[in-house]
Image (cartoon, rainbow, N blue to C red):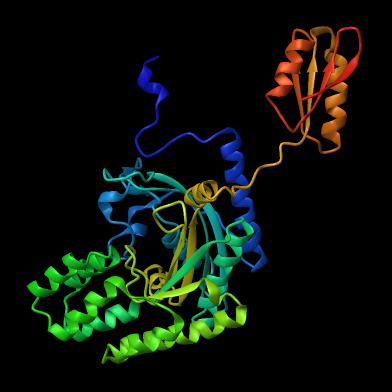
Amino acid sequence: MGKSLLHTPEGVRDIYGEEYARKLLIEQKLHETIRLYGYQDIQTPTFEFFDVYSKEIGTTPSSQLYKFFDKEGNTLSLRPDFTPSCARCAAKYFMDETGPIRLTYSGNTFLNTSSLQGKRGEVTQMGAELMMEPSVQADAEMICLVIDALKNCGLTDFQITVGEVEYFKGLCAQAGLSGEVELRLRDFISAKNYFGAQELLEQQRVRKDYAKVFLRLSDMVLGASDLSEAARLVQNDRSLRAVERLEQLYQVLRQYGTEKYIFFDLGLLSKYNYYTGVIFKGYTYGVGDAVVTGGRYDSLLSYFGKKGPAIGFMVVVDDLLEALKRQNIAPKPASDGVLALYERDAFAGALRYTKEQRGQGVCAELTPVNDRAEAERYALGHPGKQALFFSADGGRIRLCQ
C-alpha cells in the first residue's frame, strides 16, 4: 500500500473518538433547539443537478463546485449549500401550501477551491428554513432561534450582527451602478476592503456624496439607537424602507428579550446573491469567521416554480465546535457504561453480564485480556467506565481506575 493512501486530500480530514463524540453532541443540542420551534426534518441529496446551483440563482460560483457527470451525460454537483435544495423541495412537495413551511436539515457541504486559506473543503452544516412567511416576526424568530441554539450548546459570549441587503441595493440604484459593478462593489464592502471599494467608485465616477456613503458601509457597525443615522445618509425609498425594517425587527427582538446580542451593520453582505432583505451573521471568539450565517431570500423559490418569501440560517458545526474548544467550554460527552474484561475461559460469564447490561440500555464492551494486570491497564485507558475483570476461575472483580 502506498503511503499516499493513508492521507486525505487537501481540505478534508478524519474525525473520530472523543472529538467526533463532541461533534455529535453539538449537533444533538442544535437539533433539540430547532425542533422546539416546530421545524420538521428534511434530508436532501448529497448531489443535485448542476442547475440547482446555477449562476442565475446566485449561489456558489461554478468554479468552486465539485462537478461530474452521470451515465446519461447530465452534469451533477455536490451540494455547496443547503438552501437551494430546500427551495427545490418546497416547490416540489409544498407547491400548493400557502401557510408557513418550517424545515430543518443537517449534513455535509462541499467547496472545490484552491484557496482554502485554512478552511475545509467539506464541512458539516445544520440549519433551518422558514418559507411562505414574509413578516418581521419571521425574521426575529430565525435570529432568536439562532441565539437559543448557541446558548444551548454552551456558548455565552457571542453577538449577532444584522444588516439589510436592500439598503445597499437602494444605494446602488441611486448611484446608477450596473449589475456587474454592484457585484464587484459588494465583494469589496463585504470583505471590508475600503481601498478596493474606493478605487472602484473612482473608476465608475460615482458622485462624491454617494461614494462617501458607500465607503462608510465598510465600517458601519451600529447600535439600535444609531439606525436613524443610517437613514439620514440616504435619499432613496428603498434604503429607507430597509432601515425601517431593521427598526421594526429590533422592537420584536426586544419582546423576545434577546436585544443584548444584537448589533447592526449596514455593510453586512454575503457571497450568496440570492439574499434579498434582512441578513445576519453570528460571531464569537476562537474562530476567524462567522459560525452562523442567514438571511431572507424572497426570490429564490420562484426559480423552482413556487413564488413565496423565505428566510433561513445555517450553523457551521465544525467552526462552532472549534470556538467552544478554544473557549474551554466544549461539552464533554458522557463516557458511561461498563467494560467486561475476561480471560479466555471466562467468556460465557462475561457474555451473560454484557447481555444483561445491554438489555437495560447500558453500553457494555466485551474485551478479552490475558490476565488481571492487562485488564487494569486497559481500564485505565477508559476513564469514566465501570470495569469488571472476569477470571478463568469464575471470579468477578471490580477494577479501580
- Looking at the picture, does residue 16 appear above or below residue 205? above
User: Front-most of 385 and 68?
Assistant: 385
Q: Is residue 342 left or right of residue 111?
A: right
- Looking at the picture, does residue 140 appear above or below residue 195? below
Tell me the residue at 16%/83% (across/down). 176
Image location of residue 16, percent across then percent down: 55, 34
Tell me the residue at 76%/31% (across/down). 385
Q: Is residue 382 left or right of residue 251?
A: right
Q: Quadrant of residue 157?
A: bottom right
Q: Is residue 252 left or right of residue 340?
A: left
Tell me the residue at 59%/33% (across/down). 17
Q: Quadrant of the N terminus?
A: top left
- Looking at the picture, does residue 6 appear above or below residue 102? above
**Does residue 368 show up?**
no
- Looking at the picture, does residue 154 appear above or below residue 279? above
User: Front-most of 362 and 73?
Assistant: 362
Residue furthest out toward the right = 394
Q: Quadrant of residue 201?
A: bottom left
User: Front-most of 42 and 233?
Assistant: 233
Image location of residue 257, percent across then percent down: 61, 77
Image location of residue 322, percent across then percent down: 50, 47
Q: Is residue 209 left or right of residue 346?
A: left
Image location of residue 248, percent across then percent down: 49, 87
Q: Quadrant of the C terminus?
A: top right
Marks counted in the figure total 0
**Does residue 241 show up?**
yes
